[in-house]
Image: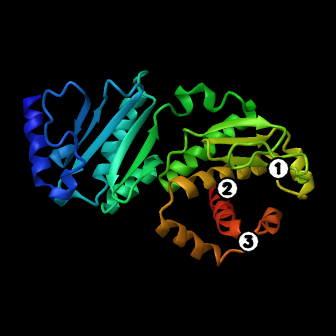
Amino acid sequence: MSNNFNKVLKIYNSLPKAQQLLVAPRGRFIDSPNLLYRLLANKDKGFVELYKLPSEKNKAFLTVAVSPDSQGKGVGKQLVQKAIEEAKLRKDINSIIYKVDNNNIASSKLGASVGTLKNKTPDFTEYEIDTAGLENNKTVLDKVSPEKRALIKRIIEAYKDKYDTDLSYMKFEDSPVAYFNNGKKVGDDFNLPFGGSWTKKKKIYLNENMDEPMKAFNIKEDKDTFTSRIIAHELAHELYNNHATDAFKSEIADLIKTKKFTTPYLKTVNKDKLEEEAFAEYLADSLL
């Protein structure tokens, strides 16, 4: 422990004062009763730690630091992924809180890629990382058909591989009715069969009978491909609202201008939602 502590302290002292601010607990690393996990990067390029406070049940707090000469090379991302993997092995941790300085662009981008926005002030942003995931949290997939489960897992892996974003915390449920973003049911006056509904409550509702929207929109592709497209589209809304940076949104917006969408759904979208819906359609297309 003492050897690791000296290495951790050396990394900490190499950081600019502004970066030291969020390395908890302010340089007092050794013998902390709240320290749960610590890992040094190869060649001591950085370190990651998890702390578990007695007052915060089922939550861990993450701190990560990378030596100035090793920053911008993916070291922090690798360390954070290792900490997430460790947390997933522990039954007493359901989520990780990662707090970043808004002026630290790299840390903000990292937080957005691995977690969802929890709280934001003019100075700091807190991200929450769900550590239950598809395999450990049965409530994620237990309310959809077995056929959809396999497709959901495949699409979530595709998001992780292509867009470096873990969306495995999202819950899914088969439903005969659509839902608004706030989680409330859509009324009977909704006259188009829905494929899926994304809500801000980390939940996606999928039509229990995909034949209905396929028939309504005259979809010619097979049902598995269409269902995968709907899953990818709804997950893209989660990425757009809780993970995507403005730079990434602009990048996709530029790509959208070069693509002609044939999805009939976009013709029904109000102009104020068209940018987000086109973003979701583009990402869905890119994963199929």
Alpha carbons under labels 3 and 1: distance apart: 19 Å
Q: Amino acid at mark 2?
A: Leu
Which quadrant of the view contains residue 121?
bottom left
Q: Secondary structure at mark 2?
A: loop
The foreground one among 122 and 99 is 122
Q: In the rendered structure, which disc, 3 or 2, sits on the residue that comes first in sequence? A: 3
Residue drawn 64% across the image and 78% down it: 257
Which quadrant of the view contains residue 279?
bottom right
The foreground one among 260 and 202 is 202
Residue drawn 50% across the image and 54% down it: 243
Picture quarter with the N terminus = top left
Nearer mark to the viewer, of 2 and 1 = 1
Q: Residues within 10 Å of mark 1 (few under 14, many from 20)?
A: many
Picture quarter with the C terminus = bottom right
- Which residue bears the numbered disc 1? 194
Alpha carbons under labels 3 and 2: distance apart: 26 Å
Numbered mark located on residue 288 in the image: 2
